[in-house]
Amino acid sequence: MTKGTRNKRMQNRPSGFANPWFQLGFGVVCVLVYELLQKRGASETANLSQVWSWTGITALVSPLIWLAMALMIVSLLSWLYVLRYIPLSIAFPLSRVVDVLIPLSCWLILGENISSRRWCGIALVVVGLLLTARPVAQLEEKL
Amino acid sequence: MRWPVFFLIPIALIAFVAGQLFLKHAMESSAVRGFRDAQVILFLGCGIFSMTIHFFVTLGLLGHLDLSYVYPFQGLSVIIISLAAAVVLKEKLSLRLTLGALLISAGIMLVSMS
């Protein structure tokens, strides 16, 4: 893939719901919700079978897991669409805003603890995201 | 911590990184060749297969450990994927992007060690 064709595709990118940056954000929300559903579903079904529980197969009896899988498919399609337009080395780090949102949601919704060290980690991720997002803003200005 | 964690976390990570590279390559090719091209279908299939392995291994881990513990291990995938995208997919990786990816990975590792 040459840089020229990639830039051209980026310039002709759709707007509104089909905008790749919007899809990146939409996908992040889907991932956040399905991760929380996975945790609930997996915890509920972890003790059904001693032998199979580490494989995750026992989690399939939970409806939450099926809902999580549906959201996973939506987020996968959204992600594939994003990959068509945005370089992986920009899109993937930005998509990891999820790694800040997940501990915060676990804290708020699931009642899990966040230690001071974990807060520091969250702060580092935020700085990394800002560093990654700035070239994107400059890229957008040029287009 | 029990033994399956040491074994299953790297498997989930490798499957995830490989899956992302396969999918990106497939989508880049699809923009030029369309979705009926055999190579595009092959790479999409490989990507989805890798992501499926990642999904079930992660489910197994989540059944026994906190989500805020299991998930952040994938933070390592940020720097690995950024470097792999530069090497394998020939994407331009600036110093700023590398530093950003490193900080995100380090931050997620710090979260996972809490």
Image: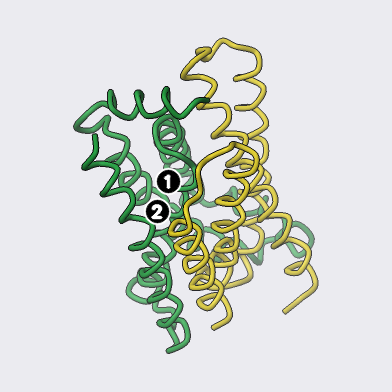
Chain colours: A green, B yellow
**Residue A122, picture quadrant:** bottom left
Q: Chain of mark 2?
A: A
Q: Residue at x 27, y 48 (%)?
A: A138
Q: CA distance from mark 2 to mark 1?
A: 5 Å
Q: Is residue A51 above or below residue A76?
A: below
Q: Residue at x 72, y 79 (%)?
A: B1
Numbered disc 1: secondary structure: helix
Residue A41 placement (x, y as % from top left): 51, 58
Q: Residue at x 44, y 79 (%)?
A: A112
Q: Is residue A82 left or right of residue A53?
A: left
Q: Residue at x 54, y 21 (%)?
A: B29
For the residue pair A88 and A137, the one nearer the viewer reads as: A137
Give the crowd class for mark 2: few <14, some 14-19, many >=20 residues within 10 Å: many
Give the crowd class for mark 1: few <14, some 14-19, many >=20 residues within 10 Å: many
Q: Disc number at residue A94?
A: 2
Residue A81 placement (x, y as % from top left): 41, 31
Q: Is residue B52 left or right of residue A109?
A: right
Task: Give the amino acid at mark 1.
Answer: Ala
Q: Is residue B43 above or below residue A72?
A: above
Residue B26 placement (x, y as % from top left): 57, 26
- Which residue matches tag 1? A91
Labels 2 & 1 near each other (Cβ < 8 A): yes
Q: Is residue B4 above or below residue A56?
A: below
Query: Is the C terminus of chain A in the top left, top right, bottom left or bottom right quadrant?
Result: top left
